[in-house]
Image (cartoon, rainbow, N blue to C red):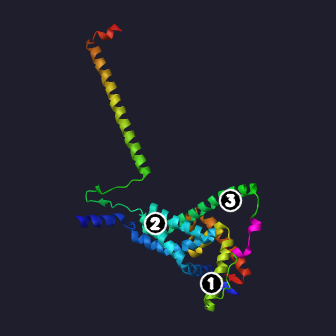
Amino acid sequence: MNIKLSNKEIGNLLNTAARQLDRSTLNELHTARQQALKNQRVASPIWVSQNGLLHGQLQLSPRALNWIIVGVVASLLVVNLTYWERTYERDHSDIDIAILTDDLPVDVFVD
Amino acid sequence: MCREFASIRADHLGATELSTPQQLSEFLAQAERRAYKQAQYAVRDEHVALDIVQDAMMKLAERYGDHPPEEFPMLFQRILQNTIRDYYRRQKVRSFWTTLMSSLSPQHDAEDFDPLDTLQDEDNASQPARPDAVLAQSQLIAVIEEALGKLPARQREAFLLRYWEEMDTAETAAVMGCSEGSVKTHCSRATHALSAILKERGIDLS
């Protein structure tokens, strides 16, 4: 055997070998393909209307969902802190006004 | 309204049109044979090769079945190569335990072995005669497949991806999870090794 081959020709010969698979192997490959297709992940359509709103089912990855949860918790925390700070300030200003107007209740002096 | 939606959706998606089951089916149908042969060259076992291809197909469909069809070749190759590597890892662990257990148990294998059990009946006269050209080609393919089987796994992977799957260096690097420089090195070494093996059989690799 004295033959000259290029890498491309080797590729072509391997293609020939792939075309010559026996019937039972082809059947098994066909079955495997059908099985895979039954489990194919299908995307839900997302429609975008003219006002830019999203309609339809939006599928989120677990990572995106985690970020959304973190965002919601963080914003709730910020709202709570702001509310508490304002309430605290208002309490203080009420006492200041009472001192200035000499209108403090007796309970303040008891302790 | 629906027409508006359709046109906006088409504009919005542009080049990244999502795939349909028909497109995935067509892709798998044209890729499955070569994938099987690749797995067979790597593991040298028909049943394991079939399992690997089935596993790779399933992973592609389950995880990336809704991706644009032009992404399928790269994704499938990456999954296939990872599945082959996983098999190597499992095999390594299994062989470790097998060696350990067999060293503890008495040896009878040499007495039980009969060469006739594994002898191939290649010269069987009852087989239908084939034309010379077909026979020569199948012999040539057998020599090449044998030579590919002798290559180290990474070199074979790089060679097959570059010269059989016709991927460029960047794509091959992405599939193999290494740099483009490594791909070039693997390919160069694979070509030299193949050339040396084939030369012994009277085939010049140019």
Residue B22 screen position, x and y as percent = 40, 71
- Is disc 3 on the same chain as disc 1? yes
Which of pointers 1 and 3 indicates the residue nearer the eye?
A: 3
- Mark nearer the N terminus (1 vs 3): 3
Separation of residues labelled 1 and 3 (CA atoms): 33 Å
**For mark 3, what is the residue?**
B95
> In the visual, does B5 lie left or right of B18?
left
> In the visual, does B200 lie left or right of A110?
right
- Is disc 1 on the same chain as disc 2? no
Residue B46 part of the magenta segment: no
Residue A33 screen position, x and y as percent = 47, 70
Q: Is mark 3 on a helix, strand or loop?
A: helix
Report the chain holding disc 2. A
Q: Give the range drawn in magenta.
A: B109-117
**For mark 1, what is the residue?**
B138
Report the chain holding disc 1. B
